[in-house]
Amino acid sequence: MQPEAIDDIGALSRCFVQAMRGFAGAVCVVTVADAEVRSGFTATSVSSFSAQPPMVVASLKATSSSAALLERTRRFGVNLLRTEQRAIAERFAGFCGEQGEARYGDDEWVHAIPDGAPLLANSVVAMDCEVEELIVRHGHLLIIGRVRAVNRDESTPCPLVYWQGRYTALADQLAAAG
């Protein structure tokens, strides 16, 4: 395959969006809270940043309701969802108009640290993080966070994945490929 240069910025953006659909991403819910005010968002943009010290990176739209809360609290939780937690991903993405507290539903939320972010009790992995740096670029907020606590399910459940524009199970994709 020979790559082609695309001069039209609109065409390049559309091509880029389609290309990015080929990148499978682990589905996470990022939680932010300040006393009784809670918000959060669904993200596939979460990644490790460094192991020494343990740090993660994520991003969200700068206009998101979670952005202002995150800037104020400087704390957040990263929750890697299980395959069967698709409804949580959809709630935190606001698919049915859920905002703020409504995104938390009836799920069980815990705190690893007294002043920490809400963590989903039965996620694959849950990390409590503190913002080290927030960078605003092109309408998005890049979050660099220091991990303060980690909870992980030792039974290694299958994570929820977003690929080709839809939620899917990693196990389903491996079975189809094998």
Image (spheres, helix red, strand yellow):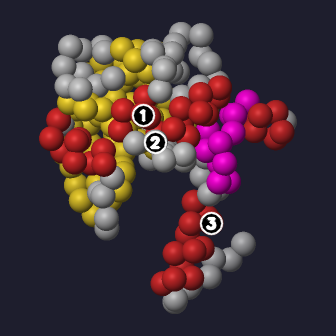
The residue wearing badge 3 is 18
- Relative height, residue 144 to residue 11 (above, below): above
Q: CA distance from mark 1 to mark 3?
A: 31 Å
Type of residue at label 1? Ala
Marks 2 and 1: in contact by CB < 8 Å? yes
- Location of residue 172 in the rendering, given as x and y in whole percent from the top left corner: 77, 34
Where residue 131 sits, quadrant-wise, is: top left
The residue wearing badge 1 is 102
The residue wearing badge 2 is 98
Residue at 20% in and 14% down: 114
Q: Earlier in the sequence, mark 1 or mark 3?
A: 3
- Location of residue 87 in the rendering, given as x and y in whole percent from the top left corner: 59, 33
Category of crowding for the residue at label 2, using alpha-carbon neighbours closer than 10 angstroms: few (below 14), some (14–19), many (at least 20): some
State the residue lying farthest toward the left.
Answer: 72
Quadrant for the N terminus in the image: bottom right
Q: Which residues are magenta?
A: 161-171
Q: Is residue 51 visible?
A: no
Q: Judging from the image, what secondary structure is the residue with disc 2 in?
A: loop
**Left or right: residue 166 compared with residue 79:** right
Q: Judging from the image, what secondary structure is the residue with disc 1 in?
A: helix
Residue at 35% in and 38% down: 100
